[in-house]
Each structure stands twice: as C-alpha cells, then as structure tokens.
C-alpha cells in the first residue's frame, strides 16, 4: 500500500517493489482529479475522516487480513491516516507488517518548506487514539514531535495552552542539513510553545522514538503523576510511527490521546530525489500491553535516481 502523490521517492518505490497486489491510496487533501490518477489499483473516497477512509479502503479487500503479508510505504502518507492505519491493522489481527520510508536528498524550499496549506480547521484526537481523560489538569503534558510545519506546531500548542510543553526533535536528522532547517522552522512557533524542554530521537528510527517517549514520560512522572498526556506527532513519518507504537504498547486505555491539527490541503511534492530507503518490521503489541515496541530496522540501497 502506498499513498499517491507526485514525489519521485513515492513513485519509484511503488514501481519497483515486487508484490502480489499493489494498491494506491489517494487522499483527498492532495487534491488529485480523476484524470491525474496513476495506472493500477487506486482507492479514492469522499470520506470525511481518517477512520472512515481506511475502513472503506479495507472493505474492498476480500478475505482475512491475518493471512496476508502486508507492506506499507509510509512516505507519502498524511499523518492522521497513517496513525489510524497502524491501529486498524493490529485491531484486525495483523501480527506484523513491514513499513518502508524513503529519505529525500533535500527539501525543495529548504527551511521555507511548507507541507500543509489552507490553515488549520480543527485540532482533535485522531480516531482510535482517544484517551480516557481526567478532569484533573494540574500536571497535563503535551509532547510535540516538531517538524517543519511551524503553523501546525503553534496550533497544537495553543490548543493545550495550559499543558507543560515538551518537544522531540529529529537528531540525527535524515540529512546533515535538515536538523538546522527543522530548528529554524520550529523556532517560528516559539511564542506558542514557550520554554519547552527539548529531547532528541533519530529521525529514521521509530523504535528509538518510542523508547525516548517512554523515558520522557518516566522523567515527568517522578514527582507527580501526569494528569493527562497528549501526543502530537508532527515530524517525520518515521517518528510518527514511533509515536503510534509507544501509544499502542503503553498508553491505551489511559489518560493519553494522540491529537493533531488537521489542515484541508497538502503539497503533492516538497522534496528532491531519493537518498536512502528504510525497511521497518513492526510486530503487534501484546494484548496486555507494556514494554517498548518490538521490531527491526534495515537500510536499503538506493532505488531511485539522484537529482
């Protein structure tokens, strides 16, 4: 499964991966018309949210997902759809799946790159990640995976204005210059975020990201229990995957939710070239929960052309 956009790092991987069945997911936020869609099996929907879209897509599948080998190229996914997809796969009985992510050579507009447009309509919980929240708010904590989209960072920070803010930045970053670009963009949200604590997790390792979130929560629970925990994964898709895994392994059925600032439109192409391609094997959390997520990660050779 791949999310269709105009990026070479998405198109080249879909073209070259060998699979018995390939499926394009065409998200409405990219604004593609019917005449612009690629050849092959494309799923489009006028669904109004991430849960409806993903569930409608899987309703077109015949058979039991438990017996299917699944690979998801997360590169072109719009984040809420990816977040819900991970929960849906595990809830459907899938025990493991592979995720691919293609690093770009660079972002086209460097630190001026914007991925979303049209403003933020609403900040809300992502379907499947709604917490059982407490009315006590004395020690609420908001952990933001801070990427390039400063507008999204600001909106989610203002939405939980009274919560303690913590930022997770991607370091090591995907490319040498991307950390500086990310820092410049995130700094534009400084007024909303305030004097937030900053932690670092590799931008290309979801399991390290999950372990870092576990440690952040442990540190912030030593003196007083966290009353409500809010996770806002706004950085790389790999870190988004790490946020999902941490929630599903350790924070389900607690006063924790994943929140996201939803934008109506996303740019179809923001990158140049293909650098490295990573493959992650993710295993489902045990029914009882607990422990950081299991999985493995491997780097793949270059599958696309440089600019």
Image (cartoon, rainbow, N blue to C red):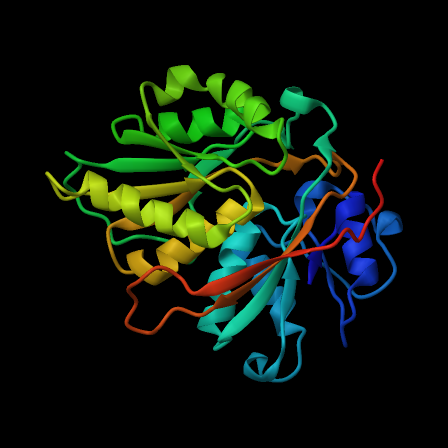
Q: Depth check: 59 or 218 in front? A: 218
Residue drawn at the location 56% of the way across and 36% of the way down: 173
* Tally of marks: 0
Above or below, comparing residue 50 to residue 195 in the picture: below
| Viewer can see residue 254 | yes
Task: Please state, as top left, top right, bottom left or bottom right, where the N terminus lies in the image.
Answer: bottom right
Q: Residue 250, how many percent across, how many down?
A: 30, 59
Q: Residue 145, how many percent across, how many down?
A: 44, 37
Q: Is residue 199 left or right of residue 183?
A: left
Q: Residue 197, how many percent across, how many down?
A: 31, 27
Task: Please state, as top left, top right, bottom left or bottom right, where the C terminus lies in the image.
Answer: top right
Q: Residue 22, how many percent across, how many down?
A: 76, 68
| Viewer can see residue 49 | no
Q: In terms of image quadrants, where is residue 195?
A: top left
Above or below, comparing residue 78 to residue 254 in the picture: above
Above or below, comparing residue 10 to residue 92 in the picture: above
Q: In terms of image quadrants, where is residue 289?
A: bottom left
Residue drawn at the location 42% of the way across and 57% of the way down: 245
Q: In terms of image quadrants, where is residue 99?
A: bottom right
């Amino acid at each position: 499964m791949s999310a269709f956009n105009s990026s070479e790092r998405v198109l080249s991987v879909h073209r070259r991966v060998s699979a018995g069945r390939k499926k394009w997911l065409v998200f409405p936020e990219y604004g593609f018309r019917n005449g612009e869609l690629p050849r092959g099996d494309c799923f489009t929907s006028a669904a109004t949210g991430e849960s409806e879209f993903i569930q409608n897509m899987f309703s077109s599948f015949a058979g039991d997902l438990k017996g299917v080998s699944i690979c998801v190229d997360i590169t072109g996914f719009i984040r809420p759809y990816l977040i819900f997809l991970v929960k849906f796969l595990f809830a459907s009985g899938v025990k493991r799946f592979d995720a691919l992510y293609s690093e770009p050579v660079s972002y086209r507009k460097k630190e001026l790159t914007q991925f979303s447009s049209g403003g933020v309509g609403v900040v809300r919980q992502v379907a499947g990640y709604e917490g059982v929240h407490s009315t006590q708010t004395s020690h609420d904590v908001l952990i933001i995976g801070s990427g390039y989209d400063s507008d999204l960072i600001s909106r989610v920070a203002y939405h939980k204005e009274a919560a303690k803010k913590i930022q997770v930045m991607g370091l090591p970053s995907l490319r040498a210059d991307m950390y500086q670009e990310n820092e410049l963009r995130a700094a534009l949200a400084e007024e909303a975020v305030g004097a937030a604590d900053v932690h670092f997790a590799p931008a290309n390792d979801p399991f390290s990201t999950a372990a870092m979130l576990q440690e952040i929560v442990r540190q912030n629970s030593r003196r007083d229990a966290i009353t409500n925990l809010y996770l806002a994964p706004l950085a790389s898709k790999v870190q988004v995957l790490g946020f999902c895994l941490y929630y599903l392994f350790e924070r389900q059925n607690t006063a924790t939710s994943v929140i996201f600032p939803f934008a109506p439109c996303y740019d179809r192409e923001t990158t140049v070239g293909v650098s490295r391609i990573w493959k992650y094997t993710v295993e489902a959390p045990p029914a009882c929960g607990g422990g950081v997520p299991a999985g493995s990660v491997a780097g793949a050779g270059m599958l696309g052309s440089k600019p």
